[in-house]
């Protein structure tokens, strides 16, 4: 995916320099510095998940198009390579070594 340089800078800043504030009796109190990287419950996590899954979707569609992964017979028409829901991912293939090797190449 191609993002503008300014957006990438903002994203990097959100991930590498978090600051937190506490709410006590409904009043926000001073900020304190957090450790780098994402934590469970960070509000940016769902957006990052969506961006990464969009890229993964493109990779999976490409390997199927190149013949590196063969679809399950029930998923050929309409062509369904995978399904995403919340934080789950289902990948459909014929289960052959050839297909598993293709899926593994995407995940590596």
Image (tube, grey):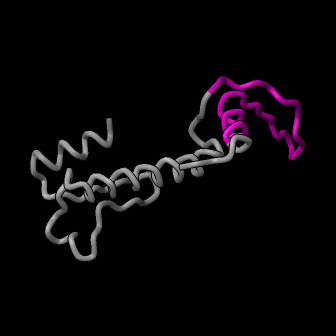
Q: Quadrant of residue 77?
A: bottom left
Residue placed at 64% from the left, 25% from the top? 36
Q: Position of residue 48 (x, y in %)?
A: 57, 46
Q: Is residue 14 above or below residue 1?
A: above
Q: Which residues are magenta?
A: 8-36
Q: Is residue 14 above or below residue 59?
A: above
Return the residue nearer the eye: 15 or 5: 5
Return the residue nearer the eye: 51 or 33: 51
Decide if residue 107 is on the left or right side of residue 26: left
Which residue of the protein is positioned furthest toward the bottom in this rendering?
77
Residue placed at 32% from the left, 40% from the top? 107
Decide if residue 73 is on the left or right side of residue 64: left
Q: Position of residue 7 (x, y in %)?
A: 70, 44
Q: Position of residue 89 (x, y in %)?
A: 36, 54
Tell how many labels.
0
Return the residue nearer the eye: 22 or 77: 77
Query: In what quadrant of the picture does the C terminus appear?
Result: top left
Magenta segment includes 25: yes
Residue placed at 46% from the left, 50% from the top? 55
Decide if residue 77 is on the left or right side of residue 84: left
Q: Quadrant of residue 79?
A: bottom left
Q: Position of residue 53 (x, y in %)?
A: 45, 51
Q: Quadrant of residue 22?
A: top right
Magenta segment includes 38: no
């Amino acid at each position: 995916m191609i993002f503008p340089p300014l957006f990438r800078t903002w994203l990097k800043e959100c991930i590498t320099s978090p600051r937190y504030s506490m709410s006590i009796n409904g009043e926000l109190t001073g900020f304190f510095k957090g450790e780098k990287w994402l934590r469970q419950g960070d509000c940016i996590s769902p957006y990052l998940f969506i961006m990464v899954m969009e890229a993964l979707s493109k990779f999976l569609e490409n390997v199927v198009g190149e013949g590196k992964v063969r679809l399950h017979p029930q998923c050929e028409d309409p062509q369904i390579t995978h399904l995403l829901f919340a934080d789950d991912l289902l990948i459909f293939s014929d289960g052959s070594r050839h297909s598993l090797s293709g899926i593994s190449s995407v995940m590596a």
